[in-house]
Image (cartoon, helix red, strand yellow):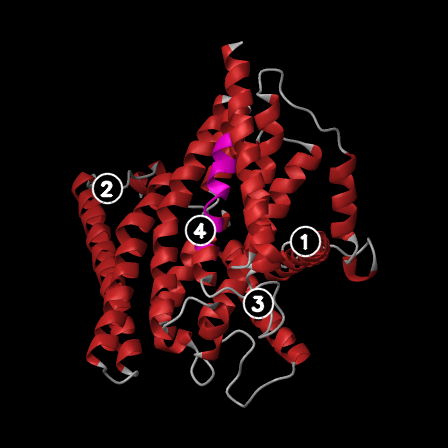
């Protein structure tokens, strides 16, 4: 009875949190700063926008699944999906139908309420951030002056869903996967926050629109190449893509925090992963690649959206490329990379940007400092790797057994001759 009462309390807190988020969305999208304007018409408009946005993201997920399969097949000398629809375009649709038709079961020892709510807690933050991500200057649900802050604040909520999914499953393997997911996501949130802070310093604003406008002549990837690298690598870890898919490593912990899920609820986790992948690509395009702007003048809204989507898909294809190239990291390697490499580099990026802005140095000094900071860990890693290799070779040489050459015994024919 105590356990069930605890489940009800936790479930009530989750529902209250979701209602609070929805209430915040109503105030943000409908009448930010003016609650008197919240009417049934505004709520209906918000519901329509959310449905359209969800449909667009579902279509995007289908295109990403098809694109990843095709790209991995090309890089691994395979064919990829070709049978279902022209060029295999309907294969993701067939997969989605199969997932929705599969039986949705829950373990007998699981906490049913929390078990079925956890996938929503993972997907909702990935969906909500799109309310503030602009596709073009005027193509956005709601352009916030604190859009970067809203993105950071909402995106970290998915950690709760992953931990809750593992704990509510009643499986020690799922709990282990949830704990790994929390450790990984918390660690790699720090470099993402620091690089976003760097972009806000360069643009002197936390609005996505202002950040893109500040890159009209020179994109921030030129000024801060190290910042883009840190954001890209940390983004891979945030979405759990290879080589950072440790918390769902099948060979180590069966299947991560969602090992006990099936059917539609597992499909929600799958949907959230690809939506988050597209979020990382879109935010990287906005923060470092100039979004919908280019240095040759203003573009029409449709052309700006096409340019932004092109840059986003370029970053997403880089993510797929990394998956086809690098093996999975061990958990100790993953945590070492986060705390010993990416976090110090992200702080170094912030310090270099602050120095350039405070002393008003020429802007070309920023990429020079960025590359110089990047060269330090690269040189150190090469030297440490060479030192370890020499020590290993010396240790093997000391253990080597010297075999003296023995004279070949003579054959009888040779002895008689």
202 inside magenta stretch: no
Q: Is residue 113 above or below residue 75?
A: above
What's the magenta bit mostly, secondary-structure-wise?
Answer: helix
Mark positioned earlier in the residue sequence (3 or 4): 3
In the image, which is nearer the foreground, mark 4 or mark 1?
1
Q: Are marks 3 and 1 in contact (CB under 8 Å)?
A: no
Q: Is residue 266 above or below residue 76?
A: above
In the image, which is nearer the foreground, mark 2 or mark 4?
4
Mark positioned earlier in the residue sequence (4 or 1): 1
**Separation of disc 2 and disc 4 at Cα?**
78 Å
Residue 239 appears in the picture as rendered:
yes
> Is disc 4 placed on a helix, strand or loop?
helix
Badge 1 is on which residue? 39
Badge 3 is on which residue? 134
Residue 243 appears in the picture as rendered:
no
**Separation of disc 4 and disc 1 at Cα?**
27 Å
314 or 45: nearer the viewer = 45
Badge 2 is on which residue? 407
Badge 4 is on which residue? 153
Q: Residue at x 53, y 62 (%)?
A: 281
**Separation of disc 3 and disc 1 at Cα?**
25 Å
């Amino acid at each position: 009875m105590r356990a069930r009462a605890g489940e009800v309390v936790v479930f009530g807190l989750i529902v209250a949190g979701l209602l609070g988020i929805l209430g915040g969305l109503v105030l943000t999208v409908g009448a930010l700063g003016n609650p008197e304007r919240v009417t049934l018409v505004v709520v209906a408009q918000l519901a329509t926008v959310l449905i359209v946005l969800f449909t667009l993201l579902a279509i995007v997920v289908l295109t990403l699944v098809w694109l990843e399969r095709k790209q991995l097949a090309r890089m691994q000398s395979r064919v990829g999906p070709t049978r279902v629809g022209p060029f295999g375009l309907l294969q993701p649709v067939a997969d989605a139908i199969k997932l929705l038709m599969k039986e949705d079961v829950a373990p007998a020892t699981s906490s049913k309420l929390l078990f079925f709510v956890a996938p929503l807690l993972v997907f909702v933050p990935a969906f909500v951030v799109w309310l503030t991500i602009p596709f073009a200057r005027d193509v956005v649900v709601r352009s916030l002056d604190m859009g970067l802050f809203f993105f950071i604040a909402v995106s970290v909520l998915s950690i709760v869903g992953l931990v809750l999914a593992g704990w509510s499953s009643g499986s020690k393997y799922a709990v282990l996967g949830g704990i790994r997911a929390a450790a990984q996501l918390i660690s790699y949130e720090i470099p993402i926050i620091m690089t976003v802070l760097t972009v806000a310093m360069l643009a002197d604003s936390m609005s996505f629109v202002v950040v893109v406008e500040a890159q009209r002549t020179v994109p921030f990837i030129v000024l801060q190449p190290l910042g883009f690298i840190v954001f890209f690598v940390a983004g891979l870890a945030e979405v759990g893509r290879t080589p950072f898919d440790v918390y769902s490593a099948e060979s180590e912990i069966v299947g991560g925090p969602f090992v006990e899920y099936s059917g539609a609820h597992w499909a929600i986790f799958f949907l959230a992963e690809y939506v988050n992948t597209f979020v990382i690509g879109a935010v990287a395009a906005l923060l470092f690649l100039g979004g919908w702007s280019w240095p040759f003048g203003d573009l029409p809204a449709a052309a700006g959206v096409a340019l932004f989507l092109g840059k986003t898909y370029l970053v997403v294809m880089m993510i797929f490329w990394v998956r086809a190239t690098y093996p999975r990291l061990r958990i100790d390697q993953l945590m070492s990379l986060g705390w010993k490499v990416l976090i110090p580099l992200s702080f170094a990026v912030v310090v270099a940007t602050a120095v350039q802005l405070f002393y008003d140095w020429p802007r070309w000094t920023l990429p020079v400092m960025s590359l110089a900071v990047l060269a330090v860990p690269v040189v150190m890693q090469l030297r440490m790797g060479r030192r370890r290799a020499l020590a290993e070779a010396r240790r093997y040489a000391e253990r080597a057994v010297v075999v003296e050459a023995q004279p070949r015994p003579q054959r009888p024919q040779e002895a008689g001759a």
